[in-house]
Every structure is written in structure tokens, then in C-alpha cells.
Image (cartoon, coloured by chain):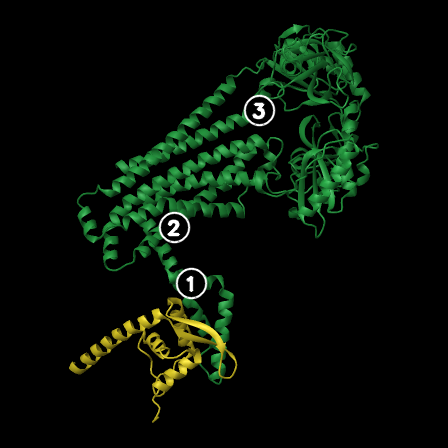
Chain colours: A yellow, B green
Amino acid sequence: MGKPHAPLDLLPGTLDLLILKALARETLHGYGIAQKLKDSSDDVLQVGESSLYPALQRLLLNGWVKAEWGASENNRRARYYTLTAAGRKQMAGEREDFDRMIAAIQKVLQTA
Amino acid sequence: MGKLFRRFHYWLRRSRMDAELAEEMEFHRSLAGRRAMGPSTLALEDARAVWIWPWLESLWRDLAYGARAMLHQPGFTAVALIALGSAIGVNTSLFTIFNGLALKPWPIRDPARMVILGQNYSVAEYRYLAEHTRALSGAVAMGHCGVRLEGRQAGCSAVSGNYFGVLGVEMQLGRGFRTDEDRVDTPQAVVVLSHALWRNRFGQDPDIVGRRVKLDDVPFIVVGVTSRDFLGTPSGDIWIPLPSRRLLRPDDPGMLQFLTSPRFCCANVAGRLAPGIAREQARAETELLLNQFRSQFGLQKIKVELRDTRWLSGAATNDKSGPILAILGILFLAVTLVLLLACANVGNLLLARAAARRQEIAVRLSLGGSRLRIVRQLLVESLALALAASAVGLAAAGVLPGILARRLEPAAAAHMRPDVSVLLYTIVLAVAACIAFGLAPALHATRGNLADALRQEARLPGLRLSLRGFLLSVQVAVSVVLLSSAGLLVRAVQRAETMDPGFVINGISVVSLDLPASEYAGPRTAAFAQQLQAQLEGAGVGLCDWQPLSNSRRQTNFRLPGEDEQNGRSIDFHEVNAAYFDVLGIPVLAGRNFASGDAARQAVMVNEAMARRYFPGENPVGKSIVWTVPREIVGLVKDASTQGLGPAEPILYIPFRAASVPKILLRGGPPAAERVSAAARQLEPRVEVRVAPLAEAFDQARQPAEIGAVLAGGIGILALLLASIGMSGVFA
């Protein structure tokens, strides 16, 4: 695990992409998404509910994820999010844009 | 589109969605071990705002943009606002009148529980129903009774004793009627005054209760004054108990029959639903009870319908509501056309403006702006315009109907104020107008591509002209229709003015005499009338029981000889002397005029309408009719519309009986009336004499038609103005 870094602010617009990616292979509830982002980023990305839930609503609104109520691991009612076909397509597109953007930023940083 | 649907879906079920979101976030916090993660309500708000805010915000932005655009083009805005505002104004005003006339429920406690049975019930039938009903917590009866109050015509309702109690009318002063004032054998001379009458005629006298006022010639005691909000059902000035009508017509045996016979018509009946009873239940019970009653007397079975008090039964409707509604219907059509005209007009202006913005729009489209978004923005701009225009319209609706109502039906003026339904109507109108004038130009402006737009800058004509041409032809067509119908209506009123009423109006004076109220009742009045009649014998002045064109009439029942006694036919009758026909220039066509001794012989005269209906193709002179006793028809006179303007109705003339103070008709002005006044003063020095030209009554009778013509002319002129604005806008 190593030494935890201080939490970073995300680049604008990337949270949606990260959530879509987190849901790419499994169905998760809100807390599960936050945990997954935290774990897979070695504790760098700590998403609070104040940004997570508006983002989830946005994805619901755009039809990229859908939500269903189910029982959680400790037997409480929880809302599980699943990626839709439109969401998968959106993720691919955003992934491409993101890669281009990062590459461009890297290029600027290296040459400047 | 899916996004819009999801937003709508969220909006429909927003309280459940919000609860779910809150639950979900609470769950999150419990898993996170309640660590501080920012204030949760704020997070909740942020999440919720995703669904609502951008949509509202962009709508607001578009509205603000539209308002700014309006301010930047004051000329265009002023013209559009005047055109749309006046069109919406006349529509809203008319709706306000319609609303006050027909749609407002009765101004009573809990009007939703009141139901109306209708007006074809006998008083006896009503009594039976009121006594036996369980589904109604109370049933009331009411009928019209024309009387003069202190010498002036008053709208009078004769009502059952429980009327004010069942309706729940609040009293400004005193009380409503008691049930012991509702007994046929012991009629009481009690009267309740309306607030308006109390204010206008009695100067809001706080000691009015207990005072005597004179109805016709009979003193009645004031027992109460209604609250200001209650105008009556329909509107009236005074209320008396049903049996008290006997006091007003002591020598009319028909009155007792009206109050007791199951065959006599008619009383309006209404009832209040008992708690927990549905209207259908009450209807079934009422129908059963009424048919039980009717079968006892061998009367036909009837179907009963219970209407609510809202539709066409509001405070201002009365017997005249049929024609009034027909006129309103025509006016609605006219003002709808005016609105259409204004929409075509503004649509054309917008189209011209959109042409100027075409490049801007084309650039936005080519830069990837969605067409839907731009159409929406243009529509919202139109909406801003329409809403501003409806504010103008609402202001008009606050003023115009009141002015009209004060001239036509003063009692109803208080009801002609805009309310929530008027506001809703105006908003619906504004949105409809906005779509009517804004959608086509918006779609048109966003058609085509950048290259087209840039090319078209050089040559303006093209596709656009066809839409403009269409709108222009709509304007021309609508304004031609409006103008020509307005012209026809004005012409019809002109013809009505020159129409021959069948009797002389100009140069005729009407003398009215008022005797001191407290001393003159019944026999003494008759004695006065007889002496006066004797004095005026041979003076060539007409005597009659009611003044022509004063909206009053008296009715009785008669039958033809040999007919069954139950076979009563209702007919107007008029007490007159022989000189009446001479003074009014009504020619005797067959037989002879009244002569002395005719009263004792029970002779009658009839008009042509009566002869046509009951003696078709025959000469009625020499025949007889039965009205309590057989009466011989001695003369036939030409039709004269003395009951009111319009075709003459069948009428029976009987010799003046001198049971009440006559109205005196004579040729010439006040000097000619001097002899009559002198004769009256000689008999009673305290008598009040009023002399008025008959033409005055004629003018009053004609007023509704004149107002109609002014309205039609006004709408026509508005249409003409709108059309010319539209044309000059296009050709400029």
C-alpha cells in the first residue's frame, strides 16, 4: 500500500468517467463505488458524497447508468448501479477524449 | 428526448425519488462510519438539483433574454403589445363576464353541496318534497315576483321560509324568514332587503329593521338585510315569503291555487345534500318522492336531474340568461377571431424580425447549436411577449366588464371581477397565442443552412414570402368577416330602432301616483282609484294597471268553453280603459272598443296574436273564453309590443277595475298632465305625482341592443386597426 498521499482534486469531468469505469465489470452501490475508486487509486482518490451523488444523478439523467434497489452485504436496502449500453459507449468515447487530453498535457509539460 | 422523459418522470415522482436519494446517502454515511463528509443536506440538495436546475435555469435565461430583446426593440414591442394586449384584453374581459354570469357558484355557504332541481315544480310538490326528503338536508323553493318598492320597480323573489337558513346566507342586519312566516293560511307582511338596495335606497339606515316599506300598495315590515356578498338566486333586490304573495294580490284567486294546487306552475327548487349523501343518491330519492306525489294526483311521471350551482345558475343568471348566453357565444366567436387576427399580425412581425436574425441563427446552427434549443429560445421569447400582453389584457379585464355590467345589470357588477379562473384562462390564452404566432416563424427561421441564409441576404423573397402571404391572407379574411358582421349587427339595431312597435311612443306622457304608504292599503286605495277614474271619465286619458315597456306583466289562466277545467292556458292580461287604445293609437280591427258597463258584463278584448293562436282563421269577436267565469270577446285590436320590444304576445284586455292606483297615459307633456295631477291632489293632497315621457322607457328597453351594437362596432374597429397595423408592417 505504501504511504498514503493526500487526497487530490479531480480534473473536471473525470469523475463521471471514473464512475463509469468502476461500474464496467460489476454492479455496485454508491458506497461501493467510492470504495472501489479509493482502493484502485491507492487511496489517492477519495470521493465524498457531495460530489459522488450529484455525479450519479447526472449519469442517471443521461441514461448511462441505471439503478435498482437490492439487499446489501449487511442486509440493508441499497441502491445498485449498473452500466447501460449507452453508458458503455459514452465511457469509450470519454476514455478516448481523456487519453488525448492527458497526452496533450504531457506533451506540453515535456516541451515547455 | 430520453433525457427530457427522464426529467419528467423524476418530476412526476419527485417526492419518492427524493426520499430514495436521502435513504441511499444515509446508507452511504452509515457504511462510512459517520465520518464527516461535508454537510449531508447540502450534498442532497446538490444531487437533487441535477434533475431540476439546469432546465429551469435555461428557461429563465431564455425569458430574460426575450425580455431584453423586447426592450431593445421598443417599436416592435409596442406594436406587438398593443395588438396582442388588446386582443387578449377583449377575450379576458368577455370571459370575466361569462365567468361572473355563468360559472360562479351561488354566493352561499358551501355551494358545492347545493343542487338545483329546476323550475317546473308546483309549490305543493315542493312542500311534499321538503317534508319527506332524507337525502337533502333542506330543500328551498323560489320564484320571481315583480313588485314596486316605494313606487319603483324592484327585483323580488318569493321564497320558502327556510331559504336563508338552508342556503346559509349571512345577514348584515336582522334575520331571514322564520318557518311560521311560510304558512299559506296566515301570510305575513315581512320582507328582507338586499345589501345593494339598503345602501342605494335607504342610505344604509342602521334602524331599517322593523320599518315599514311599501310593496306595490301594501306595507311590509323589514326583518333583515342580507350581507353584501349575497346577490340572490338569481339576483334580486328583495325577498318575501311565498305565501306573502297573497297579500300583494288579495283579489286574485289564482294566487291561492299557485300556493296549494299540485297542478300550478312554477317554482324553482333547489336543495342541500345531506352529509355523506352523493348526488346520484339524492337524485334517485327525489325522483321517487316527486313521482309518488304526482301519481296521487294523476300527473305524468317525471325524470329528475340534479345540477350543481355552478353552471349557468350563478348569481347573475335569470330568465333572460338564454338570449344573453347566445349573445355571449357570438361575442366569443368574434373575440376569438380578433385574437387570431392579432396572432397572425404579431406572427408576421416576428417573421420579419426573424429574417433579420437569420444569419445569427444560421451561424449558431452551423456551430452545432441544436435546432430544438434555438426553436425553444425563439418560442420562449414569444412567450415573454405573450405574458406581457396578458398583463395588459388582465388590466383591461379588471376595468371593462365592470363598466358594461353597471349599465346592463347593476346587481351583477360586483361579480364581474377577475378571479383565479380568469387568471388561468388568460395564461392558457397567452400560451396558445404564443404557439399560434411564435411557432411557425421559429420553425421557419431555423430551416435551411448557413449557405442558404447568407445567399438569401441578397434576395429576401423566397420561401418566406409564402408564410407571410398566408398570414396576411388570414388577417384580411378575418378582418373582413369581423367588419362585415359588425356592420350587419349595427344595421340590425338601426332597423330595430325604426321598427314599428305597434303603438305611439313619442309625445306620450306617463303619470305615476304614489299614495302615502301607511294609510292606503286595500279598500282605501281602491276607493281612491275609483274616484279618480270617475273624475277622468271622458278626459281622453288612458288608464291601465301597468306601464307599457316597463318590463312588467300580469298573467292568468283561462280555458276555452267546453274544455276541461284542468286545461288552464297561461296568458298575459292587461287592465285598460277605452281611451288607452286611442291614446296609444292602437286600432280596433273588429268588434268595438270597451264601453261603460263592460266591466260588469265581464267583456274582454284580445289582440291579433291571441286570436291567431286560439281562434285560428276565425273572427274571435262574439266568442267567449272562461277565466273563472265566461267572458265575451267584444273587440279585436292590432298587435302592439307593450310588454317589451319584440313580437307581440297573446294578451287579454279587461276593463280597468280600479283595484289599484292606475298608470295614466296621455298625449302631450307635463302641462297636459296638469289636469290629472290636479284631480289626484283634490282627492288626496299628499299624493306624489311623477310625469315621465314614455320614450324614456322605450330607450331603456332598447339599451341592451344598443350596447350590443356598440360592442360589435368596437370589436370591428379593433379588427380594422389590427389589420391595418399588420398590412403596413408587411408593406413598409
Q: For this rendering, which residue is in front, B284 or B626? A: B284
Q: Earlier in the sequence, mark 1 or mark 3?
A: 1
Q: Residues within 10 Å of mark 1 (few under 14, many from 20)?
A: some
Depth-wise, is mark 2 or mark 3 nearer the camera? Answer: 2
Name which residue type carries label 2. Ala
**Could you tell me which quadrant the N terminus of chain B lies in?**
bottom left
Can residue B209 be seen at all in this image of the molecule? no
Q: For this rendering, which residue is in front, B380 or B691? A: B380
- SS for tag 1? helix
Disc 1 to disc 3, C-alpha distance = 61 Å
> Would you say B503 lies left or right of B1 here?
right
Disc 2 to disc 1, C-alpha distance = 24 Å
**Could you tell me which quadrant the C terminus of chain B lies in?**
top left
Residue located beneath label 2 in the image: B384
- SS for tag 3? helix
- Where does the image place residue B55, in percent across and percent down from the top left? 39, 61
Q: Which mark is residue B700?
A: 3
Count numbered badges in the picture: 3
Q: Residue furthest left?
A: A111
Q: Earlier in the sequence, mark 2 or mark 3?
A: 2
Can residue B266 be seen at all in this image of the molecule? yes
